[in-house]
Amino acid sequence: MLFGKLLGLISLDMGVDLGTTNTLVCVKGKGIVLSEPSVVAVKKGTNQVLLNGNAVGTVAREIMAAAPDDAVAVWPFKDGVITDFEIIEAMLGYFLRKAHSRKWATRPRVVFAVPCEISAVEKRAITVAAEHAGAGKVYLIEEPIAAAIGMGIDLGKEGAKMTVNIGGGTTQVAILSRQGIMVSRTLRVAGDQMDEAVRQYVRERYNLLIGEGSAEKVKIEIGSAYEPSEEMSLEIKGVDATAGLPRRVVINAAEVYEALSAPVGAIVDAIKTAVEACPPETERELRNDGMMLCGGALLRGIDRAIMEATGIPAHIADNPMTVVARGTARILEEIDTLSQALEEGQSPA
């Protein structure tokens, strides 16, 4: 125990929120030091990472923005599932080395927040990737628990707690108690699917093709999960689906609300299903104490829409996008007292 504490003082232990869209890395005592897209640029037809293995994250996105003929973008973590084990290793290795600005004097401990449904094979892949990057001990913690810790929820107290983490590719709904996760639901509907719903709506309504970036901008600036009470609009540009020529249209908040109704409705239904799976006394506790929203929970009116549909107060966490990463940071600070929430990563024999 004493050796572990001394080791923590001389090594830069790290926590990682591995997300479909973005990955955040925090360093013990420093907080979040890296936040980059979970993407890798590779040579077309191969798994060869460009720029000698450095075309990862922000660098990869900049490369792909130039639309090169010989490169493709790979997102190795899709809908909460690893889709390319070789690329995930290259990506995690790059992020961990970049987060550690100097050569490692010792092999640091690394805590990964992972989805509840992650498979044993995926857990091993993450562990091996971290070890190859220079990590010593690798720990895994389920995302809802990391999120709760990051939001300052005391899991040691009696009573049920509920978290809803709206990510890029998945939404994780969980009800927790002192014993751990009572109920969890992972829905493959989140921020990315909202963007795609906006794109489809614009194409069907205006016969206009717009990019992912434009759709996300529409969602952020005038999107709403609750019927908007104020008139807002935004001009967007795209390509006419028939003529193939550039064209602009003006879309209003009511239209975006309509476009987002299906993905928002799916998230609300997942929350209702999780609550219905609880004993009556747990449901009463949740109705009294409410639930905490994090991740991409900044969509206008999402808390109100959830509360009206479920009857449970919904509260948006402070800095909701960094909650899970902050949870891993706190775990690093209190790894001895919070160790019961961790699973030690196992590499293949």
Image: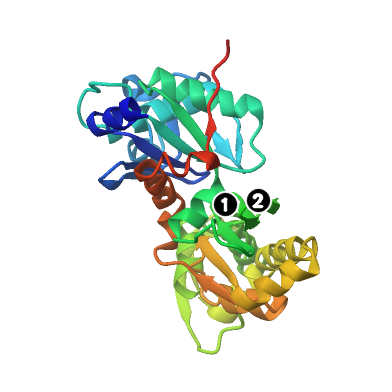
Task: Tell me the element at label 2.
Answer: strand
* Residue drawn 63% across the image and 78% down it: 288
Instruction: Tell us which disc is closer to us: 2 or 1.
Output: 2
Q: Label 1 belongs to which residue?
A: 144
Establish if 32 lies above or below 196.
above
Quarter of the image that includes the N terminus: top left
Q: Is residue 74 among what the camera can see?
A: no
The tag on residue 181 is 2
Locate residue 32, reporting x and y percent: 32, 47
Amino acid type at circle 1 is Pro
* Residue drawn 21% across the image and 23% down it: 103
* Residue, far top: 349
Q: Are marks 2 and 1 in contact (CB under 8 Å)?
A: yes
Q: Is residue 341 left or right of residue 160?
A: left
Q: Quadrant of residue 10?
A: top left
Amino acid type at circle 2 is Ile
Q: Quadrant of residue 66?
A: top left
* Gap in angstroms between the C-alphas marked 2 and 1: 8 Å
Task: Tell me the element at label 1.
Answer: helix
Establish if 200 lies above or below 331.
below
